[in-house]
């Protein structure tokens, strides 16, 4: 096996092990939530900003009626609010309420606290190594995100030239 492939597999294996270690510690906070995975996904999508129901459906890969049911529950829990789009009254837009925003912030904060506790165990040299490595990974993730966005734009542009049936 080539060295590059061996290292990639080693990193992926360690990442999986880290995920398992961290999930056992944070599971209690997540398990205490009375939300389905789809409901959590909607909350995280809305954390990025208000979104139409159609965009949520597309993001989740479900129908508009399915996402409406998911959002109905989140509205009843006072985690999400809905309103008409100011640009197009036919569209319904969802956004996090203060309660929904606080919930996502708590989940992120719990992860940050766990990471900070782990980093406290490292020496200065180890921290420098981790900082450099995460910087490199962030750069790669940014490049991948840009490539995906460009691919989406090209795909949308290509579809606009197709004849309408």
Image (tube, rainbow, N blue to C red):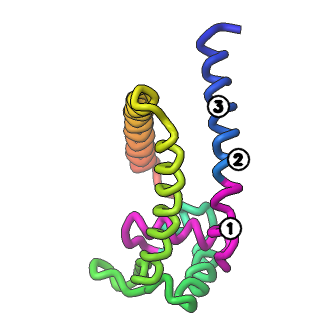
Q: Is residue 38 magenta?
A: yes
> Which of these two is toward me, 67 or 160?
67
Q: Position of residue 83 (x, y in %)?
A: 39, 87
Which residue appears at 67% of the width and 24% of the height? 9
- Callout 1 secondary element: helix
First of labels 1, 3 by sequence position: 3
Which residue appears at 68% of the width and 62% of the height? 27
Q: Name the quadrant containing residue 97.
A: bottom left
> In the visual, does 73 lie left or right of 89?
right
Marks 2 and 1, how far apart at CA: 14 Å
> Which of these two is toward me, 81 or 149?
81
Q: Visible in this render: residue 54?
A: no
Marks 3 and 2, how far apart at CA: 12 Å
- Quadrant where the N terminus sits is top right
First of labels 3, 2 by sequence position: 3
Badge 2 vs badge 1, beta-carbon distance below 8 Å: no
Which residue appears at 66% of the width and 24% of the height? 10
The disc at residue 12 is 3
Query: Dot 1 corresponds to which residue?
Result: 28
Which residue appears at 42% of the width and 48% of the height? 156
Which one is closest to the eye, mark 3 or mark 2?
A: 2
| Residues shaded magenta | 23-52
Marks 1 and 3, how far apart at CA: 25 Å
> Which of these two is toward me, 165 or 127?
127
Query: Dot 2 corresponds to which residue?
Result: 20
């Amino acid at each position: 096996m080539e060295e590059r492939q061996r290292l990639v597999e080693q990193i992926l294996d360690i990442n999986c092990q880290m995920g398992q270690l961290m999930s056992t510690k944070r599971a209690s906070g997540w398990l205490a939530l009375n939300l389905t995975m789809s409901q959590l996904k909607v909350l995280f999508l809305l954390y990025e900003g208000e979104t139409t129901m159609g965009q949520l459906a597309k993001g989740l890969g479900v129908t508009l009626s399915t996402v409406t049911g998911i959002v109905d529950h989140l509205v009843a829990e006072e985690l999400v609010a809905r309103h008409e789009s100011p640009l197009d009254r036919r569209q319904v837009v969802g956004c996090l309420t203060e309660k929904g925003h606080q919930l996502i912030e708590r989940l992120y904060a719990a992860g940050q606290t766990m990471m900070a506790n782990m980093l406290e165990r490292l020496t200065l040299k180890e921290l420098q190594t981790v900082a450099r490595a995460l910087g490199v990974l962030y750069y790669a993730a940014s490049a991948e995100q840009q490539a995906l966005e460009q691919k989406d734009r090209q795909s949308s542009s290509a579809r606009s030239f197709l004849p309408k049936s």
